[in-house]
Image (cartoon, rainbow, N blue to C red):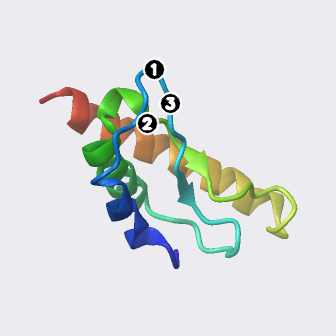
Amino acid sequence: MRHEHEWRVWTDVKFPDGRIYMPGVISHATDLVEHPEVVAERLMNFASVLGKENVQTGTDCGIGSRIGHEEIVWAKLKTMSEGARIASERLWAK
């Protein structure tokens, strides 16, 4: 993703309590299905600056209308779920 490095801009920001943030961890602009480890890494990067209790996974601008094949959409959603599970296990095991 072209903006993958941008989680770093949040390192100096004070976030309001009680907010949940949903960074886009799978791309809507490509048929490439991300690996679950990549999704987990993206979530963990955001959790490192937002707090693990304040992050949940999301798509980058939605995926329904931009990707041509339904099978790819479902594969992306599956990898997003698997990546979230991996990140949760790593973040909450600490």
Residue 10, placed above or below residue 78: below
Number of the label disc, if any, that sits on residue 55: 2
Say which label, 3 or 2, has the lower sequence index: 3
Residue 47, placed above or below residue 9: above
SS for callout 1 = loop
Q: Compare residues 59 and 83 and report the one nearer the observer.
A: 59
Q: Where is residue 16 drawn, in percent x and y?
A: 43, 29
Determine the image quadrant of residue 50: top left
SS for callout 2 = loop
Q: Compare residues 18 and 69 and report the one nearer the observer.
A: 18
Residue 54, placed above or below residue 83: above
Number of the label disc, if any, that sits on residue 18: 1
Q: Are marks 3 and 2 in contact (CB under 8 Å)?
A: yes
Q: Are marks 1 and 3 in contact (CB under 8 Å)?
A: no
Give the amino acid at mark 3: Ile
User: Where is mark 3, residue-wise?
Assistant: 20
Give the amino acid at mark 1: Gly
Residue 17 lies left or right of residue 47; in this view the side is right
